[in-house]
Amino acid sequence: MIDTLWLPYTQMATASPPLQVVSAEGVRITLADGRQLIDGISSWWTACHGHNHPHLRAAVAAQLEKLPHVMFSGFVHEPAQTLARRLTALLPRDEQRTLERVFFSESGSVAVEVALKIAIQYWRNRGQERHRFIAFHDGYHGDTLGALSVTDPGCGFHDAFSAYRQPQFFADLPRDAATRDAFDAMLTAHGGEIAAVIVEPRVQGAGGMRCHDAATLAEIRASCDRHDVLLIADEIMTGFGRTGTLFACESAGIAPDLICLSKALTGGTLPLAATVATDRVFAAFCSARAEDAFMHGPTYMANPLACAAANASLDLFEREPRLAQVAAIEAQMRQELEPCRALPGVVDVRMQGAIGVVQLATATAAQLRPAFVERGVWVRPFGDSVYLMPPFIIERDDLATLTAGVCEVVADWSRQHG
C-alpha cells in the first residue's frame, strides 16, 4: 500500500503503482513477486560496488555497536576524522591548490548549497560583496532553492519555482573559440559580482548526460584564475570513478576551489555528502571576529554510521580494481550500444567511463521505462536520454543483458517514432 507515500518526480494522480522491492544483492534488485531486475543505474548512481556489499554492511554494523550518532558541534569522532583525512589525500590537486577542509552534510543538494554559501561569505569576509554565480546550460545541481538557481532553467524540473530562483548567469560550456570568448566576456563584464563558477566536470548529469572534454574543463579553470573567481566542481555524480578517473577533475589536471561530493560516497548505503575547500578559502573564515565563522550545521552532519560506510567504500577502491572495471564497462558499452546510432530518431550515442547514453530526437524517453522492466532490467530514462550507469562490479553477461535491452527498446521506439 502506498496511500500514505508521496513519491519523487511522480504525478501521483496518474502514475502506475511502483514496484515493491524486498531485497537487493550485487547488481540485482528482487521484487515482492519474485522477479529480479539487473540494476542499470546503480540506484540513482550510488551503488558503485553493487548492492548490500558485505564489507560495507560489516562496517556499518560494527559502528552501530559503538556510536550510531552524536551531534557534530562541540564533538568530533574518529570515523569522520579518518574519512576527512582519506578524502583530502585522494582529491585532485594542482600546483596552486589542494583541497584540505571537509564540511560534511547529508545530501548532494545540501553540499551544493554549502558550497554556494561558502563562496558568497568568502568574498564578504574579504570585504567584497559578490553574490552571483555563473553556471552552464544543461547543468543540474540539485532540488533545493540555491541549487536550483544554478541549474539550467531549461531542464524543466523546477518550473513551478521560477519566481523563487535567484537570478544567475548561464553560459555555454567553452568548447570552441566562440564559446570561450563569450565565457571570458561574461567574466570580464560581471567578475566583480561573481562569487564562483559552478560546473559538473566532464559529464552534466540530470541535465541530459552531456559530455565535454578535459580541455574544456581546463579552460574553465584558467578563466576563473584570470578573473580571480572561485571554481566549484560539482562531482556529486562524477566522483568516485564514474567517469574513468577517481575524480573527473583529474582528467584535466586541475583542482577546484570547492568540490561537492555525495552519491557514491558511501557506496549506496547511507546518506552523506561533503563540501571540501582549499586552505585559501578556509582561511577567510578564520579570524577574531565571530561573524566570520561559517554558520551552517546540518543536524546529522558527519553521521558516524555513514562515515563508517564511506571509509569502507574507500577500502574497496583501494583493494579492488574499480577503475579497471570502469574501463572495461566503457569498452563493452561502446561496442554494444553503437548499433543504436544507425536507428532513425537516435541523435547520438556517447560514453564516458561507466556512463553510456543513447540520445533520442524527442524527449519521450521516460515512456520507455515499463519496456525495460519487461526485459528484466532496471533502466530509468528521462528527457531525451536512455542511459546506463551500472555498478562497477557488473559481470560481462549482465552488462550485455543491459545493453541488449537498451538496443531492443530503442529499436522498438525508433520503429514507432523515428
Image (cartoon, grey):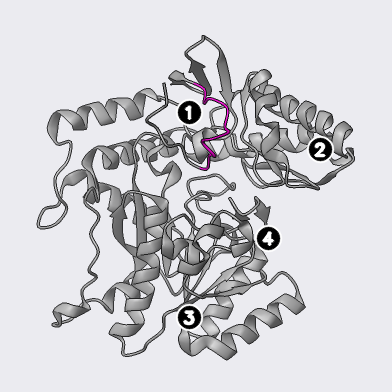
Q: Residue at label 1?
A: 50
Q: Is residue 164 above or below residue 393?
A: below
Q: In the image, which residues are magenta?
A: 9-19
Q: Is residue 323 above or below residue 373?
A: below
Q: Is residue 321 visible?
A: no
Dot in front, 4 or 2: 2
Q: Residue at label 3?
A: 229
Q: Secondary structure at mark 1?
A: loop
Q: Residue at label 2?
A: 338
Q: Residue at x 68, y 72 (%)?
A: 174
Q: Secondary structure at mark 3?
A: loop
Q: Is residue 116 left or right of residue 333?
A: left
Mark 1 and 3 residues: CB-CB less than 8 Å, in contact? no
Q: Is residue 418 left or right of residue 355?
A: right
Q: Which mark is first along the chain, 4 or 3? A: 4
Q: Residue at label 4?
A: 213
As drawn, the label of residue 95 is: none
Q: In x, y percent, where is residue 334? A: 75, 38
Q: Which mark is first along the chain, 3 or 1? A: 1
* Label 4 crowd bin: few (<14), some (14–19), many (20+), radius 10 Å: some
Q: Quadrant of residue 138?
A: bottom right
Q: In x, y percent, where is residue 266? A: 37, 40
* Label 1 crowd bin: few (<14), some (14–19), many (20+), radius 10 Å: many
Q: Quadrant of residue 319?
A: top left
Amino acid on which disc 4 is placed: Asp
Q: CA distance from mark 3 to mark 2?
A: 40 Å
Amino acid on which disc 1 is placed: Gly
Q: In x, y percent, where is residue 70? A: 14, 45
Closer to the camera in the image, 77 or 112: 112
Closer to the camera in the image, 241 or 61: 61
Q: Is residue 154 left or right of residue 7?
A: right
